[in-house]
Image (cartoon, helix red, strand yellow):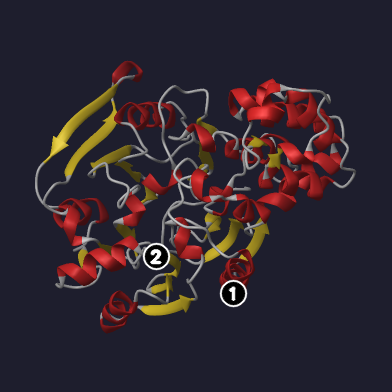
Amino acid sequence: MPIRVRNEIMPLKKVLLHRPGRELEHIVPDAMDRLLFDDIPYLGSAQAEHDCFARLLREHGAEVVYLEDLTAEVLRSQPALRELFVRDLIAGSGSLAQAYGDAIRERLLSIPDEKELVLTAMAGLPFSELELKRGRLLHELLGDATQFALEPTPNLYFTRDTFASIGSGAALNHMHSAVRNRETVYARYVLRYHPDFAGSVPLYYTPDEPFSIEGGDILNLSPTVLVVGVSQRTMPEAVERLARNIFADEAALIRTVVAVSIPARRAFMHLDTVLTQISRTQFVVHPGILESLRLVELTPDRGGEVRVRELSGSLARVLSDYLGCEAELIQCGGSNEIISQREQWNDGANTLCLAPGSVVTYDRNYVTNRILQEHGIEVHQIPSGELSRGRGGPRCMSMPLIRETEE
């Protein structure tokens, strides 16, 4: 079974990462908003921090695989896919890439090494790297020298976003921002063609669906209950489609989807920026969202329909009911509102569970980390001076493929 994720907390056995690459060096100030960055990370330090993260995961028993390696293995084992892969990248990259598609295709297909092809595509292609027809083209006269024919994909190190493991299946997501559409191509080729996954992973959502959903909003509460955030980047229609598709799979164990509506703000972005599970009964939460939450239960009805009902009671009460035990919410930053907002912005609530009560966090969120330790949580801190500039924490940077199941 190539994917088995029925919870958020049991020992992590296999995880997918992407090591930040040249795409970070292709962010320029005028493109930051479009590329969803608030600052430009320093690549050397970002890679060192990411290597520290990967090393920590291995030290705690997880096999680490990289998106760029798996994609390259697909192309290496099936050379006939190279051209189709490049065409799909161009098709998912917007009108400018499509207008210069021939030059982009020629540049990428000229790269003999499959991994270098993949890394180059991830980094993006400025016009200066393309062989264009020479002459007094209007673009040469009026174009921006920093413009890319194929945009960089600097958000790709947040592997949680593009697809999400759900039980033994996955949601291959429709990204909220058009600039991120191309990111799903890599996961699609891995899941469809890689020998470790091909034919074995049911897809409960695909980018062909019209509504956006991203993996940071998907939380496996238990083998039978999935929690999904309705957020800045995940639409309620997508949650309903996802639930319907899961319920239609007779092999799926999930019979309840709980939609959690959070404020549609960049600071919150996804559910896992304000809520993550850290042990069997404990969660870290940003207190600023507790008063505005709405929770809705979706369950299968006869005839393939979905039954929807709004839930009453607090988040802690609802989680307790589904877990069958008393849930404890630990506040990110504690009771100090200034600290809470600062550390939530730096992903203090975005933890990755290595095992029940053992989590990875950013070292910069020292108040939240201390509070977690006071509640009996084993906290493994990683450096975060550059990785945090992308607005995502350890959970965002990791896509679990296999976790141990509860007995």
Residue 272 location, quadrant: bottom left
Q: Amino acid at mark 1?
A: Cys
Vertical side of 282 occupied by 22: above or below: above
Residue 276 percent across, percent down from the top left: 33, 59
Residue 359 percent across, percent down from the top left: 42, 71
All told, the count of numbered labels is 2
Tag in front: 2 or 1: 1
Image point (32%, 47%), residue name = 266
Work out whether residue 364 can be spotted: yes
Residue 34 percent across, percent down from the top left: 47, 40
Q: Residues within 10 Å of mark 1 (few under 14, many from 20)?
A: some
Image point (83%, 24%), residue name = 133
Work out whether residue 282 can be spotted: no
Q: Which mark is residue 52?
A: 1
92 or 82, which lies in front? 92
Q: Residues within 10 Å of mark 2 (few under 14, many from 20)?
A: many
Vertical side of 29 occupied by 360: above or below: below
Determine the secondary structure under disc 2: loop
143 or 369, which lies in front? 143
Report the side of 344 relative to 2 (left or right).
left
Report the side of 362 relative to 318 (left or right).
right
Vertical side of 393 occupied by 208: above or below: above
181 or 401, which lies in front? 181
Image point (71%, 42%), residue name = 121
Q: Amino acid at mark 2?
A: Thr
Q: Which residue is mark 2?
A: 351
Residue 57 location, quadrant: bottom right
Earlier-in-chain disc, 2 versus 1: 1
